[in-house]
Image (spheres, rainbow, N blue to C red):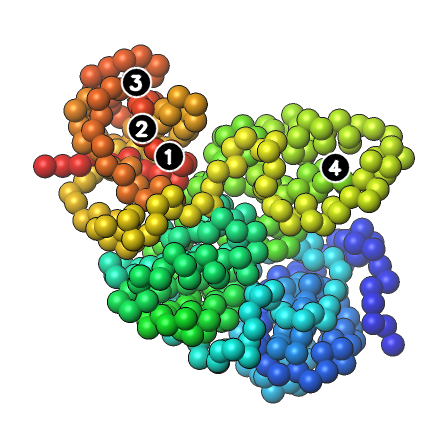
Amino acid sequence: MQLYNTLSAEERAQLIDEAGKQRLTLSFYAYAKISDPKQFRDELFIAWNALDALGRIYVAHEGINAQMSIPAENIDAFRDTLEVYDFMKGIRLNVAIDQDDHSFLKLTIKVRHKIVADGLNDETFDVTNKGIHLKAQEFNNLLEDPNTIVVDFRNHYESEVGHFEGAITPDVETFRESLPIINEQLQDFKEDKNLLMYCTGGIRCEKASAYFKHQGFKNVYQLEGGIIEYTRQIKKENIQSKFIGKNFVFDHRLGERITDDIVSQCHQCGKPCDNHTNCANDGCHLLFIQCDDCKVAMENCCSVECLETTHLPVGEQIKLRRGIQVGNKVFRKGKSDALKFKNSGDLPKKPLAQVETKNIRQKIAIKKVLVGKAEHYYTKSKIAQFVIENNELSIGDKVLISGPTTGDQEFTITELFANGGPCETAKVGDQITFETPFRIRLSDKLYKILG
């Protein structure tokens, strides 16, 4: 009876290539009471190994959380293995938009204390009293409500490459960190605001919605099936996507393209980019965003120190990383002093009550016209760089800079440079710079206020 992998990742990849058959990447979860997680784990391994199913699965007394790769021809048989258990009958499988036959190369099923590390004592509140589930169009509709607060319950390395417009994106490394932060930030909005939450596949919001209802929030909603199901629905029903950028995924692909927007930048040079990579130094493996140019120049490394390390003899590299807790650094994704342009994922600098003087979603109901998009921000000189795509911009114009993290910031242009020289009026196609009293991000847009 086989209860573990007998092939290496490289051997498995070769067999997949030789088979030449389509595989489906999918995910699912279910909260349920499982009396013997170890036995449950073994049963699943035997059934799924026989179907050439691969993936990373966590089981616990509270349920199952799975991300997997299944041969397309075996999908019905795979569903049958789920139907054996009452709590997984008819369960929704979130099938990936972009398929990759190598998304998973091992079948790993681990018994954990919880299927998602949330740091909560489930005995202190009713975990079944969850928020209202919303489908894609319903979610979009509630986003437009000025009384709505939308919160991203993913980690900073997920939200920085893609998020819903106007969402609060906590600068956290784990789900458990976000719960007390958001609870504190939203204390004044429990009674009269809609708390709208989302995550990748819905599992984090299942627990978070119950937790926030227990904390006294009256109107709690969650995106059914998370970003993955949202994407499927908007494509099928031709619905406008309110999600911009990439959806980070926890497999070999590291992301699914939802829209063409690039909302993040290379952590090394600042160029618009949303491709994650792991540092090639086996003593680091830090996950960070790296553009193609830096990937070539730095040989997939996050720093000069790591680059130099990779050029040492293998024996020397092993000596250097002996005793280092590499795993800790792997999950401190993007947190390194060597990364000069890691600046996304922050909470608003001001308390929400102050930021939200006009509208909790940080959108000001004023007459405005789009002028252009942000290209760069020079930190030391506090200079913002935009490219004009529509209309003109002149000294004396009142403008609005708006973005998910920046919020809505108004000020008047007192000095303007176009294509490197001073000017009175900039036109379409000009690259403009001007001083701003606040930091801008690549996801920010520049508007001219009319009237």
* Structural distance between the alpha carbons of marks 2 and 3: 15 Å
Q: Is the residue 70 above or below the residue 378 in the image?
A: below
Looking at the rendered image, the quarter that the N terminus falls into is: bottom right
Alpha carbons under labels 1 and 4: distance apart? 32 Å
Query: In x, y percent, where is residue 380?
Result: 43, 23
**Amino acid found under the numbered disc labelled 2:** Thr
Tell me the SS state at disc 2.
loop
Residue 73 appearing in the image:
no
Residue in the picture at 32% in, 67% down: 190
Residue tagged 3: 418
Q: Mark 4 points at which residue?
A: 281
Disc number at residue 336? none
Residue 435 seen in render: yes
Q: Nearer the viewer, mark 3 or mark 1?
A: 1
Kindly identify which residue carries mark 2: 436
What residue is disc 1 on?
Answer: 440
Q: Are marks 1 and 2 in contact (CB under 8 Å)?
A: yes
Cα–Cα span, label 3 and label 1? 18 Å
Residue type pointed to by label 1: Ile
